[in-house]
Image: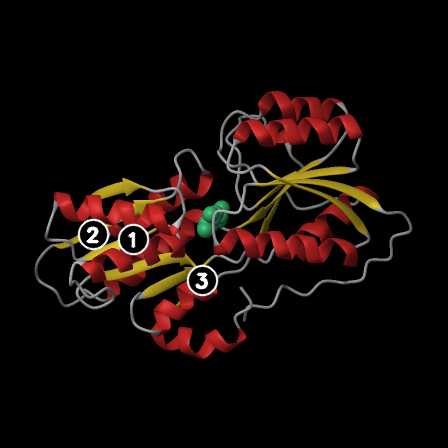
């Protein structure tokens, strides 16, 4: 289940294609697996990867992209830390004739000619599924269910779209109510901090939606410290399905995880090679997902590679 989608590797390409890639950072298990997947896929496709790590800062990503333009790489790819503020640098890439591929996250710009393709998950659907699976568990409950949300970093596509998708689906269920939310920054520590604040503000929390596993794990730890059993007294749903998340799910501390696969390296290289050769590529390439419950997590854990 966790293997990457099949593709025609190794690629029959005569020249090394130079790909400049700017990564978000190394904020957690998902990101590390994503980096590994991209680094492993590049040589299989005869792609020479210039990998840079923006350490969570947009200004770093913009200067990486500018250097890739100056070096005249064949293709630029990056995972935009936040949605806005890319137009100027991407116009320069376009003017230089260098195609751009977005990975994982998206940009918010009216000019869709600024990138050739984007590869990643449907964040709105992830949010929908998190709400719908959670509400299943309360189908028989007659009273209001108080749900809180721990969000990812402000301004990022998954933060906005997971929140949107979650609220939209939760609002379809009469007794489910989003009563409070707190921002995090995708890390376990930020999830713990957010959970503490939420518990300080109210004592009637039934369920938590954490926008990624790491933040959900931080929240679970805080609940535990407060004598509240995560997964039982307070139900938790998260997104990602990293090994750490799946371990906690299998142990009953989480209730559901919506998978968001970081293993998109091969899909990226396929698109890069196609663009380089001049073939037409899809504007949007979706990564795969499934939803895990506790039993499924136990089954899937032994083969989990990230
Ligand atoms: O869910 C989170 C990571 O952009 C989809 O970034 C990605 C998110 C992922 O920090 O764990």
Disc with the residue nearer the chain's start (1 vs 3):
1
Q: Is the C-beta separation of discs 2 and 1 under 8 Å?
A: yes
Query: Which mark, residue 147?
Result: 2
Q: Is mark 3 within 8 Å of ligand 1?
A: no
In the rendered structure, the answer to whether residue 109 lies left or right of residue 50 reads left
Quarter location, residue 130: bottom left
Residue 23: tell me if it is visible: yes
* Label 2 vs label 3, nearer the camera: 3
> The N terminus appears in which quarter of the rendering?
bottom right
Label 3: which residue? Answer: 241
Label 1: which residue? Answer: 209
Q: Residues within 10 Å of mark 2 (few under 14, many from 20)?
A: many
Cα separation, mark 2 vs mark 1, equals 7 Å
Q: Is the C-beta separation of discs 2 and 3 under 8 Å?
A: no
Q: Is mark 1 within 8 Å of ligand 1?
A: no
Question: At which x and y percent is residue 254?
Answer: 31, 65
Residue occupying the point 53% across, 30% down: 58
In the rendered structure, the answer to whether residue 171 lies left or right of residue 107 reads left
Quarter location, residue 144: bottom left
In the rendered structure, the answer to whether residue 87 lies left or right of residue 15 reads left
Q: Residue furthest right?
A: 14
Is residue 255 placed above or below 53 in the rendered structure? below
Dot 3 falls on a residue whose secondary structure is loop
Residue 293: tell me if it is visible: no
In the rendered structure, the answer to whether residue 60 lies left or right of residue 277 reads left
Cα separation, mark 2 vs mark 3, equals 21 Å
Disc with the residue nearer the chain's start (2 vs 3):
2
Residue occupying the point 27% across, 41% down: 182
Cα separation, mark 1 vs mark 3, equals 14 Å
Question: At which x and y percent is residue 251?
Answer: 33, 73
């Amino acid at each position: 289940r966790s293997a990457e989608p099949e593709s025609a590797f190794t690629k029959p390409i005569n020249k090394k294609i130079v790909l400049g890639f700017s990564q978000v950072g190394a904020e957690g298990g998902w990101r590390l697996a994503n980096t590994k997947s991209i680094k492993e896929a590049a040589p299989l496709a005869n792609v020479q990867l210039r990998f840079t790590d923006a350490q969570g800062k947009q200004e770093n990503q913009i200067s990486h992209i500018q250097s890739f333009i100056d070096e005249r790489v064949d293709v630029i790819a990056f995972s935009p830390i936040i949605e806005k503020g890319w137009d100027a640098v991407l116009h320069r890439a376009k003017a230089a004739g260098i195609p751009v591929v977005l990975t994982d996250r998206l940009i918010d710009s009216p000019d869709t000619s600024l990138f050739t393709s984007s590869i990643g998950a449907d964040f709105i659907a992830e949010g929908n599924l998190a709400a719908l699976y959670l509400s299943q568990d309360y189908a028989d409950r007659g009273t209001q269910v108080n749900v809180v949300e721990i969000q990812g970093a402000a301004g990022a596509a998954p933060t906005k779209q997971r929140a949107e998708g979650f609220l939209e689906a939760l609002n379809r269920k009469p007794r489910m109510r989003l009563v409070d939310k707190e921002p995090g920054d995708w890390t376990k520590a930020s999830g713990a901090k957010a959970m503490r604040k939420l518990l300080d503000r109210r004592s009637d929390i039934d369920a938590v939606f954490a926008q990624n596993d790491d933040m959900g794990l931080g929240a679970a730890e805080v609940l535990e410290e407060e004598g509240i059993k995560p997964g039982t007294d307070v139900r938790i749903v998260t997104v990602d399905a990293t090994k750490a998340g799946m371990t906690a799910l299998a142990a009953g501390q989480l209730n559901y995880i919506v998978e968001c696969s970081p293993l998109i390296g091969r899909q990226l290289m396929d698109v890069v090679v196609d663009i380089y050769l001049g073939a037409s590529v899809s504007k949007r390439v979706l990564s795969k997902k499934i939803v895990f419950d506790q039993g499924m997590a136990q089954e899937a854990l032994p083969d989990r590679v990230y």
